[in-house]
């Protein structure tokens, strides 16, 4: 056996059996992530654990167990050839292990191997369902229903009983436990797709399993939890009660721009889906930008105004092309239209001198911009590196203030290709619970490439101008950010979701996502 310091630099090859955890990709262990980052070959059920491949290096070979049945042979042969192999396993590899034969094959072939524990569903799913594994009574039993013929031995004891692989036989199991002496009033929870945003938990009793599960649609993977600890769920549930739990949220932006927004939405329990609506491309001819960069370096400008993070990126790329860095901004005044643009500048090493104190827009920037004063400003020229479709508002306003503007095309925005047919159908058919619009152009472009969102879909916008554009397209605006930032927009949607959930609970109803109310009228957020 190998020690915890094993790496894949050994000539004899190596197989690591890594527990992938119960479903939430964030529950992968640090050791598992480290081994994945060094693997030459990864063997896994791609449908179940595909997201974990983000830990792998570029060029890793992927083997899907759903397509290749000879897993043991593949792992042994690959390791014998000197490669490092990671075999991702459900949950914890040694907890009701399904890979015993694969481990034995490695041992028989004298291939070095390691077994990395994972977070088992027996504890993780209970935690995500708000059920303490052992409370009051220090007894916790875990059984595999497929291995049990006589349930009488599990009917006694006051501790928690956790049953794997039993959802299809939940009703007969409940009857068997009652027949063996367990009270029919014993609390039971059945939780499917545990630790994922598809998690669904039904709380009932042994005596009511049949009627309460009849239309619940429970499928494996699922756990049945029997015992008084289930009663703690009302107080301890934290995962399924997130404000946007299970909401499918459309993010119509470029992937490059939406990474932090997507992570924030996930923290609220949402399932974000990115649909690029615009593609950012270089100008058709580079000469205009080349002259602008030369003028910036030679002192042609007093100010440079950035109206987007894409403009910062375009200038930065030109700087790198010429071997320049942030020092070229010395002596210049720099303006940024908003927080995301300012962050892009700071990451470049440039601190903005001017930002709007109110609305983060061209109008907001103009409200702060000083008029040209020949006594104070040695140069009266402003560089505006912008998109090819930028409005004239800023140029006109600066001209009125006495400045001369070089309005330069730093990048082009073109409408993206339509999303796949299933996504288009979900947009128009009410399959999304919410859509976030971060600009007027995202409204126009999404409708142009995919059609109007269904009327049950919650429409969330970043500000008044975007709201106006949405309404022009016949969309009802439900949520508006209190300040024009993507983070504030996500927070506003979460607040809306929390209010909807609270209202349903107070009314004694089961909280439902907007997509689950397609036939009914939705209430506006207050």
Image (cartoon, rainbow, N blue to C red):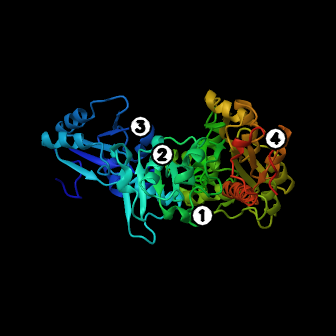
Cα distance, mark 2 to mark 4? 45 Å
In-image side of 109 versus 446 (left or right) = left
Q: Nearer the viewer, mark 1 or mark 4?
A: 1
Looking at the image, do the residues carrying marks 1 and 3 touch, with CB atoms under 8 Å apart?
Answer: no
| Label 1: which secondary element | helix
Does 136 sit left or right of 394 as displayed?
left
Observer-side mark, 1 or 3, equals 1
Q: Label 2 belongs to which residue? A: 170
Q: Residue at x 46, y 42 (%)?
A: 169
Q: Earlier in the sequence, mark 2 or mark 4?
A: 2
Number of residues whose C-alpha sits closer than 10 Å to that of mark 1, classed few (under 14), some (14–19) or many (20 or more): few
**Residue furthest bottom in the image:** 136
> Disc 2 and disc 3: Cα gap in Å?
29 Å
- Mark positioned earlier in the residue sequence (1 or 4): 1
Q: CA distance from mark 1 to mark 2?
A: 22 Å
The residue that label 3 is drawn on is 46
Q: Residue at x 54, y 52 (%)?
A: 207
Q: Quadrant of the C terminus?
A: bottom right
Upstream in the sequence, badge 1 or badge 3?
3
Q: Please tell me in which quadrant of the rendered image residue 348 appears.
A: bottom right
Q: Quadrant of residue 49?
A: top left
Q: Which mark is residue 234?
A: 1
Circle 4 residues within 10 Å: few <14, some 14–19, many ≥20: some
| Element marked by disc 4 | loop
Residue contact at pointers 2 and 3, CB within 8 angstroms: no
Q: Nearer the viewer, residue 303 or 82?
A: 82
Query: Does label 4 or label 3 sit earlier along the sequence?
Result: 3
| Of marks 4 and 3, the one in the foreground | 3
Q: 168 or 322: which is nearer to us?
A: 168
Contact flag, marks 4 and 3 (Cβ < 8 Å) = no
Residue denoted by label 4: 475
Can I make out residue 324 in this image? no
């Amino acid at each position: 056996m190998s020690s915890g310091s094993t790496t894949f630099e050994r000539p004899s090859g190596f197989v690591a059996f890594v527990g992938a955890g119960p479903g939430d990709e964030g529950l992968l262990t640090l050791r598992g992530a480290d081994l994945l980052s060094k693997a030459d070959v990864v063997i896994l059920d791609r449908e179940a654990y595909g997201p974990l491949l983000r830990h792998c290096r570029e060029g890793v070979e992927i083997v899907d167990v759903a397509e290749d049945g000879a897993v043991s042979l593949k792992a042994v042969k690959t390791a014998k050839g000197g490669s490092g192999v990671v075999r991702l396993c459900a949950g914890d590899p040694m907890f009701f292990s399904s890979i015993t034969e694969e481990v034995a094959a490695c041992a028989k072939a004298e291939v070095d191997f390691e077994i990395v524990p994972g977070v088992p569903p027996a504890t993780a799913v209970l935690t995500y369902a708000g059920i303490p594994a052992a409370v009051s009574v220090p007894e916790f039993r875990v059984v595999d229903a497929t291995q049990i013929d006589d349930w009488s031995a599990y009917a006694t004891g006051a501790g928690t009983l956790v049953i794997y692989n039993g959802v299809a036989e939940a009703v007969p199991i409940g009857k068997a436990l009652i027949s063996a002496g367990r009270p029919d009033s014993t609390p039971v929870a059945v939780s499917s797709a545990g630790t994922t945003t598809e998690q669904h938990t039904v709380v009932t009793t042994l005596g009511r399993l049949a009627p309460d599960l009849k239309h619940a649609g429970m499928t494996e993977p699922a756990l049945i939890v029997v015992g008084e600890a289930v009663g703690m769920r009302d107080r301890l549930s934290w995962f399924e009660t997130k404000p946007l739990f299970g909401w499918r949220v459309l993010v119509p932006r470029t992937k490059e721009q939406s990474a932090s927004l997507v992570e924030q939405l996930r923290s609220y329990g949402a399932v974000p889906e990115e649909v690029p609506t615009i593609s950012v491309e270089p100008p058709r001819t580079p000469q205009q930008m080349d002259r602008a960069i030369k003028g910036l370096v030679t002192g042609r400008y007093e100010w440079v105004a950035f109206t987007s993070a894409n403009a910062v990126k375009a200038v930065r790329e030109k700087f790198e092309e010429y071997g320049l860095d942030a020092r070229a901004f010395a002596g210049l005044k720099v303006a940024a239209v908003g927080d995301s643009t300012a962050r892009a500048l700071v990451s470049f090493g440039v601190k903005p001198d001017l930002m709007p104190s109110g609305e983060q827009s061209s109008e907001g920037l103009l409200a702060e911009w000083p008029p040209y004063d020949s006594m104070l400003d040695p140069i009266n020229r402003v560089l505006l590196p912008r998109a090819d479709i930028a409005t004239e508002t800023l140029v006109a306003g600066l001209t009125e203030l006495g400045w001369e503007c070089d309005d330069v095309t730093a990048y082009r925005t073109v409408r993206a290709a339509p999303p796949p047919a299933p996504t288009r159908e979900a947009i128009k058919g009410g399959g999304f619970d919410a859509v976030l619009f971060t600009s007027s152009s995202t409204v126009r472009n999404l409708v142009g490439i995919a059609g109007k969102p269904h009327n049950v879909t919650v429409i969330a916008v970043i500000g008044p101008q975007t709201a106006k554009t949405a309404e022009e397209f016949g969309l009802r605006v439900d949520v508006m950010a209190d300040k024009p930032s993507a983070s504030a927009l996500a927070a506003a949607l979460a607040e809306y979701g929390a209010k909807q959930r609270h209202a349903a609970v107070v009314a004694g109803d089961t909280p439902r996502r907007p997509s689950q109310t397609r036939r009914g009228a939705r209430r506006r957020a207050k």
